Image (cartoon, coloured by chain):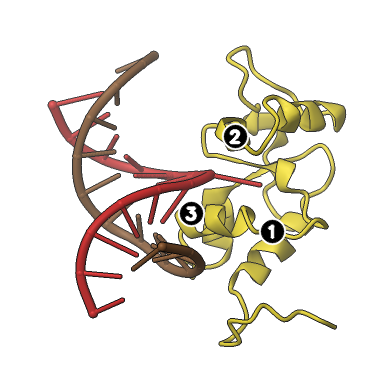
Chain colours: A yellow, B red, C brown
Amino acid sequence: MGRSLGSGSSRSAWEAVYDIVREVPRGCVTTYGVISKRLEGRLSARAVGWAMHVCPADVPWHRVVNASGGCSTDRLPSARPGLQKALLKSEGVKFRKNGTVDLEQCLWKGPG
DNA sequence: CCATTGACGAAGA
DNA sequence: TTCTTCGCCAATG
């Protein structure tokens, strides 16, 4: 199906990123660094973040936070402040007093 | 081809 | 504990 991105060469490596994010269950979150490690270093955390800003609509981008559990999208002018946090809260994700996600509780450790 | 930027991460001061 | 610096990969001008 139409997965044409124009770049042609070996598709976008981000597809692997999207696949991982799509596997994150509701009420859990993951981080850019974790995704990068899942890709065996094929993409750095920075590249993962880059991929996320061009991710399709079927990707639960709100379940991806930074290593500190902070919602990086809050600093995006194109994103609504507090939107990601609201979505995560709606899914049952716990937040700490400082406003960051409780990774100890909600960080998705993968299928295994 | 070179310089800059970006939804990051870890280490050092 | 907070702020700064470097490294990382990909995209854009």
Q: Mark 2: give few (<14), some (14-19) or many (20+) Cα within 10 Å.
A: few
Q: Amino acid at mark 2?
A: Pro
Residue A45 — which label?
3
**Left or right: A58 in relation to A54:** right
Q: Label 2 marks which chain's residue?
A: A
Residue A47 — which label?
none
Pick the residue in front: B4 or A39: B4
Pick the residue in front: A15 or A34: A15
Helix or strand or loop: what does disc 3 sit on?
Answer: helix
Query: In the image, what residue occupies the spot 81% across and 32% down?
Result: A87
- Residue A105: give x, y in percent of width and height: 70, 31
Q: What residue does disc 2 label?
A: A77
Query: In the image, what residue occupies the spot 70% across and 24% down?
Result: A82
- Residue A20: give x, y in percent of width and height: 70, 60
Are the two marked residues, 1 and 2, in contact with CB atoms closer than 8 angstroms? no
Helix or strand or loop: what does disc 1 sit on?
Answer: loop
Query: How far separated are the C-alphas under marks 1 and 2?
Result: 17 Å
Disc 1 vs disc 2: which is toward the camera?
A: 2
